[in-house]
Amino acid sequence: MTSDLLRAAFALGLVVLLILAFGIVMRRFGDRVPRRAGKRLAVVESLSLDPRRRLVILRKDGAEHLVLLGPGGDIVIERASAPPPPAPPPLPSAAESP
């Protein structure tokens, strides 16, 4: 009887240690998991307004949406705004001309 309880306690302790070790490994190396190619949805930016509400810019298929997330529900503030245009390349200065 005592050996069965000791064996069960040892097995339970081993399982708990394995779960903790897995959690530590995932926390440390979790960002290095390969992402799937060609993803269509991304969180561009997030801003915390207060402890309960957050503004999020989501990009889906090149269109950006501004969403307010909160405990009362999620509200779409702005739909399908065009992403900001890329900055133009700098023009060569007169000193760089041959």
Image (spheres, helix red, strand yellow):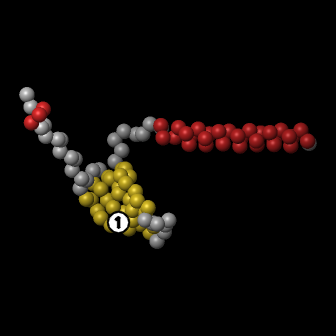
Determine the residue positioned at 34% across, 48% down. Answer: 40
21 vs 6, nearest the viewer: 21
Q: Quadrant of the C terminus?
A: top left
x and y percentages locating residue 91 in the rendered image = 13, 40
x and y percentages locating residue 94 in the rendered image = 9, 36
**Residue 66, above or below 26:** below
Direction top: furthest residue: 98
> Does the image show residue 55?
yes
Direction front: furthest residue: 95
Q: Label 1: how many residues lie within 10 Å, few (<14), some (14-19) or many (20+)? A: few
Task: Indicate the quadrant where residue 46 lies.
Answer: bottom left
Give the residue type at disc 1.
Answer: Val
> Does the image show residue 69?
no
x and y percentages locating residue 67 in the rendered image = 37, 63
Determine the residue positioned at 50% across, 65% down. Answer: 51
90 vs 71, nearest the viewer: 90
x and y percentages locating residue 20 in the rendered image = 66, 42
Q: Which residue is mark 1?
A: 76
